[in-house]
Image: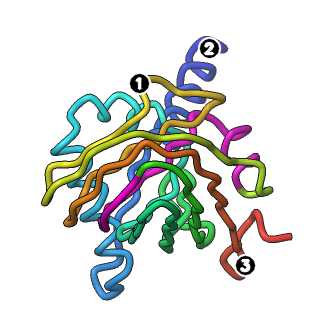
Amino acid sequence: MIKTVVIVLLLSCAGIASAEWQADPANKKQVASANAIAQIKERLPRSQPFFDEAYGMAVYPAVTRLGFGFGGATGKGFVIESDTIIGTSRFSQFTSGIQAGVRNFSMVVLFKDKDALDAFTKGKLQFLGQAGLAAGTKGIAGTPAFNDGVAIFTVTRWGLMGEFTVSGAKFSYRPMPGSKVEE
């Protein structure tokens, strides 16, 4: 009897952790975010295990980046915990180094566990340094493993850019009114 109760509880918790977010078809920004997720999964099949393991994610359907010596990028998106949007986020980046071009890309930041998501919502996530080449829609990038509970995947939507840069990135977070993480 106790084993049955434990198994039912474990299965119900597993179902909650692996629930998949569904966009509201009436919300264009949510549909764009869902399309960005689908495109990353399609163009980067190696990302699927990361999505399967993720506790939550931040989705930026369109980040625009411009650089010539110095550069920057910005984009807005949603923060999702399990199957619920818990807030919005803005990504901003400053870069310096060898770079030239402009590109627009979609980015998903995956959080392996609640601690990683909490660090993000408290403004403790940042990263530095990157290298890449993007032409048309051919640029892709991703982390090969969860680093400090975070994995990042991007796919180029359009543009032409070459770079070897040092960068500073900032993620801001704003909880949705009435969300359980609103402070």
Magenta region, residue range: 99-120
Whichever of callouts 3 and 1 sits on the residue coming sooner in the sequence is 1
Looking at the image, do the residues carrying marks 2 and 1 touch, with CB atoms under 8 Å apart?
no
Q: Quadrant of residue 123?
A: bottom right
Q: Secondary structure at mark 3?
A: loop
| Residue 18, placed above or below residue 89 | above
Q: Amino acid at mark 2?
A: Met
Q: Which residue is mark 3?
A: 178
Q: Quadrant of residue 91?
A: bottom right
Residue nearer the viewer, 45 or 168:
168
Instruction: Give the distance between the C-alpha atoms of the residues marked 3 and 2, in whole angstroms.
Output: 39 Å
Quarter containing the C terminus: bottom right
Residue sitting at 28 percent across and 57 percent down? Answer: 161
Residue 151: within the magenta?
A: no
Residue sitting at 51 percent across and 32 percent down? Answer: 14
Instruction: Give the distance between the C-alpha atoms of the residues marked 3 and 1, in whole angstroms.
Output: 35 Å
Residue nearer the viewer, 30 or 171:
171
Residue 77 position, x and y percent, is 49, 70
- The circle on residue 56 is none
The answer to whether 181 appears left or right of 79 in the picture is right
Q: Secondary structure at mark 1?
A: loop
Q: Which residue is mark 1?
A: 144
Q: Which residue is mark 2?
A: 1
Colour basis: rainbow
Callout in the foreground (3, 2): 3
Callout in the foreground (2, 1): 1
Q: Amino acid at mark 1?
A: Pro
